Amino acid sequence: MPLEVRPLRIAVHKDVHNKLIRMIENFLDSEASFTEKISLTGVAPSFVISISEGHQILSTLNIGERLSLTDARGRPR
């Protein structure tokens, strides 16, 4: 059966006042073939985000650094 390809929704958890409750932890991988959600029992869901041309980009990043991405609809994030 072929893999289903569709946008992956990544959303932060907010309270009733629209304030951030918890950050989402993700992993950037320049060698991953595709972006996927990881769901393990007892562990908060996370994501592996494929960065197709990322060897040079990932080597210059520091932990906690802010990234700008473009989502599947072309919106900046």
Image: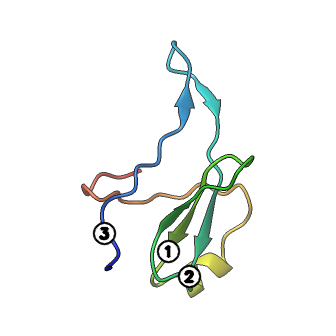
Residue at the far left in the pictured view: 73
Labelled pair 3, 2 in contact (Cβ < 8 Å): no
Residue 1, image quadrant = bottom left
Display coloring = rainbow
Is residue 56 positioned above or below 37 on the image? below
Say which residue label 1 marks: 50
For disc 2, the neighbor class at 10 Å (few under 14, some 14 to 19, many from 20) is some
* Mark 3 burial class by Cα count in 10 Å: few <14, some 14-19, many 20+: few
Classed neighbour count for the residue bearing mark 1: other residues with Cα under 10 Å, few (<14), some (14–19), many (≥20): some
Viewer-nearest of discs 3 and 2: 3
Above or below — where is 4 with respect to 19? Answer: below
**Quick one: 44 or 41, which is closer to the camera?**
41
* Residue named by callout 2: 30
Q: Position of residue 3 (x, y in %)?
A: 35, 75
N-term-proximal mark, 1 vs 3: 3
In the drawing, does residue 3 fall left or right of residue 73?
right
